[in-house]
Image (cartoon, grey):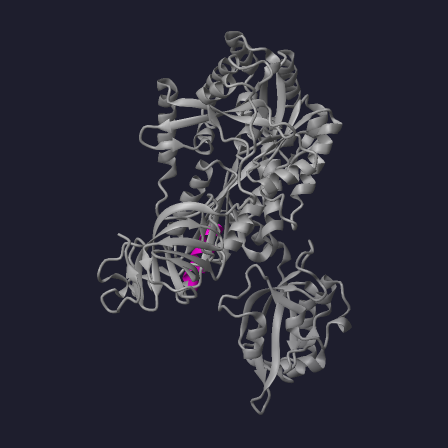
Amino acid sequence: MKNFLHGLAGKRDNQTDVRSGTRAMVPDALRAKVLDEYDRAGIGWIWATDAAGNLIYLADKATETLGLEIGELLGKPLDELFEIDSSVGKDGLGRPLKFQLKAHNKIRDQVVRFSNGKSEQEVRQVWWSLSGHPVRNSDGEFAGYRGSAADVTVEYERKLIDSKMADFDSLTGLANRHQMDRQIDGTLAAFKSSGRPVALMMMDLDKFKRVNDTLGHQAGDALLIEVAERLKNLVGDKGKIGRLGGDEFQIMFAGEDDRGKLGELADKIIQILSQPYALDDGKRAIIGASVGIAVAPFDGATREELTRASDLALYAAKNGGRGQFRFYATDLKDEEQERESVLEDLREALELGQLYLQYQPVVSISNGHVVGLEALMRWEHPERGFVSPGQFIPVAEDSDLINNLGEWALRTACEAAKKWPKSLRVAVNVSAVQFANPGLPSVVANALAHSGLEPDRLELELTESIFVGDNDETERMFAQLKGLGVRLALDDFGTGYSSLSYLRAAPFDKIKVDKSFVDSCTQKDKNSAKIIAAIVGLSNALNMETTVEGVEAFDQLEVVKSHGAKLVQGFIYSRPLNEEVVLDRIASGEFTIVPDGPDTYRPDRRSVFRRIGVIHEDYYYNAVMRDLSRNGAGLDGIVGVDVGTHLVLDLGEGQLAVCKVVRSENAEIGVEFETQLTSDGSGGLCTRHRISPYTIAAAGLPKKPGTAGPTEGKRDQSTPKFLEVSA
């Protein structure tokens, strides 16, 4: 201590003698005693480093708070013993501790964590407040630091708790809305000058309200905590996750614009969040998720613009049938207004008789005989045209209208089936909302009585979402329905969260294999064919029928047939038929269908009619795209293009696809993409990357592709090599 004090303050120092008012000399021994008592009192501790930054002195009392001997600390670099809180990362000057020490800056009340051998994840931490100043020797050379320290663990951890409460969601531990807003604002500002992208996902949970209503808010909270854990496991450190409130979540990805990767992750999030949740008292819940995605700077340059874009994409995903993701597009409408409009029109459609049923045959593979038909609801709107059930059924489920629609469908289907031979059954879909309605058995009984249809010819198709809620109520509903004599089928089986306990507890007569497995059953790198075989085997063991849905091509039919399937429903046998057509087929004799379809299933090829731009060298052509797949497209409207010519297609909204001509005949050409397109989440395709809107504007490309005038796309500054014949 004596030698240290000698270096710290010199051998002696002038002090004022209080009693005499004169200057007096304080002996080293007294100085040492006072400072030693100061150290032992725990008010604060003296520390010092040498010129290399190694600790050369620390009060003995200080080492006791660390649980170490002084010898374990002396000689070690101060910046290895202590570090700034990583959640803060920097001091008020924006400089880390190591930088301050190397720069020989003064240190003022810097809070640091004792990090020697201690992980940030450990519960018990020690926090000190350090102050210090650099000292120099007689030659003016830096000689190290001399400073003081104090233990601020209690105060600082209280501050951390207060900060966490302000910035984090108290239920899930995720960032809250305020923190997410700051993160997005900061990231957009930092990336603006370099033009780097920022992706934002908006997500909310489908059918979460039903969990709260049927199982209680405590169960809902437990489910939200599990959702947060699943999201953290999926996203990891690739993105920042926040809970904005209720069942709404937000994820930000800095530097990401690959819509292929974003779509794959969104799809994976939807699948994982749709797995069952085990709650207290042995109860289980099944929910879903919908995701909307927007990317800056393409879909917005500010947080407000980006958030609105991702919100619109989310609403589009929900309106498209839920359990889906959507990328933002400029033609998306305000979905809240759109849903209200759809609901209002749907009520009117039910009253005016605009709704009708079509019937898709279920066929025996062995002989082609039709054994039953599934009733499918259709809506032909006078202005909207055909409206997909995937669009209007979710809207109806969010209101009381689904029960009215369901009752109408049951009555209509039973009346139609009464006109068929007794060998034919009719299947009607029943939503989870209908199943939860205590009046469902009465509705079914009335439909049977009104039509005179035998109960065992009516098959109610249910999905696993019916198992959300009170197990006793579910069992009572099963008993009442089976008491009527109707058949029950478990629809969409195998979609990722199927449970054998359902089959053990519920009295199903049939299992329907989901179309998603059929779509990929011919791909050798998938397990879909094995899963189909397993479901068929399980169904046989339980004395249940199995229907495989969605078979469209002969290669699929051969696979499902070879794996034991006996009943098939799909386009290879028949599309849904109007009631009049069904009656005509029956009247013509035995209702038998011969399979007819393509030899090979091609899931991504689709017909389109879409105006696009075609760029060759420095000229922009207008053209029409007739068909599209992930790998290529068919174009119409340009004459004289040789095979092997390289082109760039302008698909709109910054989507430029590099391609090569592989077929050319008159004004029709076929192109192959250099990079495959990716799913846009709504059944369409899009490019993985986009060109900045600033670059597009600078190039003079038209706002709508394929509509370039005389001066757009530099058409007045260059000479075309090919003849443009499209309007």
Residue 38 lies, with reference to residue 254, above or below; the image says: below
Which of 193 and 477 lies nearest the eye of the viewer? 477
Residue 136 on image: x %, y %: 58, 85
Left or right of 400 on screen, residue 76: right
Total marks placed: 0
Residue 56 lies, with reference to residue 335, above or below; the image says: below
The residue drawn where x is 32% and y is 58% is 638
Residue 237 on image: x %, y %: 58, 57
Residue 59 in which image quadrant: bottom right
Which of 572 and 433 lies nearest the eye of the viewer? 572
Residue 11 lies, with reference to residue 81, above or below; the image says: below
Is residue 311 a member of the stretch shown in magenta?
no
Residue 592 on image: x %, y %: 57, 25
Is residue 189 a member of the stretch shown in magenta?
yes
Which of 715 and 149 lies nearest the eye of the viewer? 715
Residue at the outermost bottom position:
139
The residue drawn where x is 37% and y is 43% is 332
Question: Which quadrant: the N terminus?
Answer: bottom right
Residue 711 lies, with reference to residue 48, above or below; the image says: above
Residue 639 on image: x %, y %: 32, 59
Q: Is the magenta stretch mostly helix, strand or loop?
A: helix
Which of 382 and 576 lies nearest the eye of the viewer? 576
> Can residue 316 be seen in the rendering of this structure?
yes
Where are the magenta residues, as a range?
179-191
Left or right of 66 on screen, residue 310: left
Left or right of 59 on screen, residue 238: left
Residue at the outermost front position:
589
> Can residue 104 be seen in the rendering of this structure?
no
